[in-house]
Image: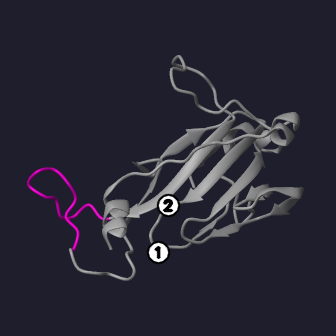
Amino acid sequence: AHCRRRFGKRSIGLYIIRDEEETSLDLPGPAPQAGDPPGVTYYEIPLVIQDRTFRAVDPLGGWRYHDGWVENFFGDTVLVNGKVWPFLDVDQGKYRFRVLNGSNSRRYKLSLDRVGVGGTQDLPFHVIGGDGGLLPAPVTVNEITLGSAERYDVIVDFGCADPPTCSTPLP
């Protein structure tokens, strides 16, 4: 229970680990690096999705959680990289998203809806990896479902979209 309470109180991150096989592939990049100057455009973006509850605040500034065991926690607010409803302006071209479900219990079904296009015309994307590393070949999908602590590595090609549809809320 101690780890669960610590996990629930903090933001989490992820490490990006590369090997020779991955670096030999022509994948979108760069990824954010410590010390990057302002204005760098990134084409490899880590996305950590978490749910949180911000209603009860400890007088010392921390989040107040029930001290007893709670089997499942479902927050009332979803964050991506620590931000509520972030927004990303994208260039036309390919982006690599390393998506991690950092929620304790919540599952997420993710898809990309085309902005300004009527109906449910999802933008397809390519899964190139998951918890077990890179896949033997990319798999084209319209959505993915992430369980708790599950990870996907996806490529999204915004080059096929018209410029007005290239601004997308995340996720």
Q: CA distance from mark 1 to mark 2?
A: 9 Å
At horizontal 35% and vertical 63% (from top left) the residue drawn is 8
Q: Where residue 59 sits: x, y (%)?
A: 8, 54
Front one among 84 and 68: 68
| Residue 92 in sight | yes
Task: Give the main secondary structure of the magenta stretch.
Answer: loop
Bounds of the magenta segment = 53-66
Question: What amino acid type should be assigned to the residue bearing mark 1?
Answer: Ser
Question: What amino acid type should be assigned to the residue bearing mark 2?
Answer: Gly
Q: Where residue 140 sits: x, y (%)?
A: 85, 61
Q: To which quarter of the image does residue 126 belong?
A: bottom right
> Which residue lies under the disc numbered 2?
102
Q: How many marks?
A: 2
At horizontal 75% and vertical 63% (from top left) the residue drawn is 121
At horizontal 72% and vertical 60% (from top left) the residue drawn is 130
Disc 1 + disc 2, Cβ < 8 Å: no
